[in-house]
DNA sequence: CATCTAAACGGACTGCGGTCCGGTTCTTAT
DNA sequence: ATAAGAACCGGACCGCAGTCCGTTTAGATG
């Protein structure tokens, strides 16, 4: 059982984090400032969330869960019921939109000490893409191909394209559709 | 004209950096230790190379230049003379081999403060892929598609696959060939 | 209510990348 | 040779993420 003061402090920290991020953006959030703003010690922050990335992951978890639910159980074409290719296209489009909205947070969450490919949610996307590839009869190492396609949707890459090169979401969507269509279509 | 003491210190620093990396690996190299080992002040290190990433980039530059020369002016199928698709395949294969050899260095060089998509060499690969795509008649936003394909060859991704998931170079090569073949082949 | 213990707490501390500035040294012009 | 000044040097300093450990407190037990 979790001690009540621990629970109270976790809520305080999450509230304070949302506050600070709302004011100055995710990347300006430092653990010292967070601790001070929440009125707790720095050690407490790290015991609760392990690292800065862990905190970001926690903040992201609700929207991540919602996104996952949509492509796993939601209505077609994103959810089950549509052909694999259409779901693949819809997945990319939704993911791009998702990154446009929560990109900074996702970016901050990726700098985990080990990896940034081990983010729990990522495993699910890869698996999802892999399943859809198989459904479309893609037989040449779908596991690895899923990860290659997934790399295309990485937040840092997408944000760089949009913010530095002025690429529009539409253009990203079109390119994604082109990519997966060609990969899935048998030669 | 560069002052002679500055040149001397730069050589000292590069030598010391190669020493330390040879002993403990690239990611164990800290700027403090480097300065101490080279017998110069810390400020000197940063004036010379700007940042840790800049130093790594400098160390990488010879092998990068050699790699670039090979795919731009070297013999086919990597260099000019072969069909676009074959050059594309060869490019990926060579790049994968390159990352296997210099991956740690490339990884350390990517953490530039701004981007990691602005690494000067990267612009060249993207452009190269783009040109080859065009050569094969790929008309749907080759600029963006080149970057998507390039993302597949990012050092951090490749190293993660190999070191964490035990994927072999052959498997990476095959998947790359499959990917670019399908992208280039008209539907 | 008194006691006891595991858990939570906080902030000093470390190591890192990176900046700054007063002092030093090389170069050039006279 | 010498004076001027630009370029360079060193290391103290900053802010950051993350660790450590002595201290406090929740909450269960008698």
Image: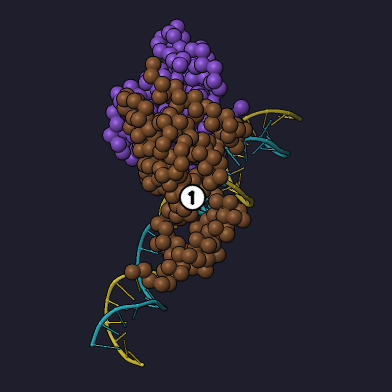
Chain colours: A brown, B purple, C yellow, D cyan
Q: Quadrant of residue A37?
A: bottom right
**A80 over B152 or under it: above or below:** below
The quarter of the rendered structure image containing the N terminus of chain A is bottom left
**D25 over B2 or under it: above or below:** below
- Residue B71 makes an appearance in the image: no
- Residue indicated by mark 1: A63
A169 left or right of A7 in image: right
Q: Relative to the observer, which residue lies in front, D9 or B112?
A: B112
Q: Relative to the observer, which residue lies in front, A7 or B91?
A: A7
Q: Residue at x 33, y 32 (%)?
A: A143
Q: Quadrant of residue B114?
A: top right
Q: Residue at x 55, y 36 (%)?
A: A160
Q: Residue at x 54, y 40 (%)?
A: A97
- Residue A76 makes an appearance in the image: yes
Disc 1: CA contacts within 10 A as few (<14), some (14-19) or many (>=20)? few
Q: Quadrant of residue A145?
A: top left
Residue B28 x %, y %: 38, 43
Q: Chain of mark 1?
A: A
The quarter of the rendered structure image containing the C terminus of chain A is top left
Query: Residue farthest to the front?
Result: A81
Residue B14 x %, y %: 44, 33
**A184 over B162 or under it: above or below:** above
Residue B83 x %, y %: 44, 9
Q: Secondary structure at mark 1?
A: helix
Q: Residue at x 54, y 54 (%)?
A: A29
């Amino acid at each position: 059982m979790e001690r009540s003061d621990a629970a109270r402090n976790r809520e305080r920290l999450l509230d304070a984090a949302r506050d600070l991020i709302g004011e100055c953006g995710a990347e300006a959030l430092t653990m010292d400032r967070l601790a001070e703003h929440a009125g707790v010690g720095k050690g407490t922050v790290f015991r609760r969330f392990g690292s800065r990335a862990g905190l970001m992951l926690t903040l992201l978890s609700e929207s991540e869960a919602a996104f996952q639910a949509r492509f796993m159980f939601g209505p077609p074409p994103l959810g089950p019921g549509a052909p694999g290719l259409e779901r693949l296209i819809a997945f990319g489009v939704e993911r791009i939109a998702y990154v446009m909205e929560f990109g900074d947070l996702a970016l901050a969450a990726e700098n985990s000490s080990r990896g940034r490919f081990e983010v729990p949610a990522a495993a699910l996307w890869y698996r999802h893409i892999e399943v859809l590839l198989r459904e479309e009869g893609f037989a040449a190492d779908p596991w690895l191909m899923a990860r290659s396609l997934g790399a295309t949707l990485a937040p840092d890459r997408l944000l760089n394209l949009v913010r530095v090169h002025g690429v529009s979401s539409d253009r990203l969507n079109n390119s994604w559709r082109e990519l997966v269509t060609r990969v899935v279509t048998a030669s």
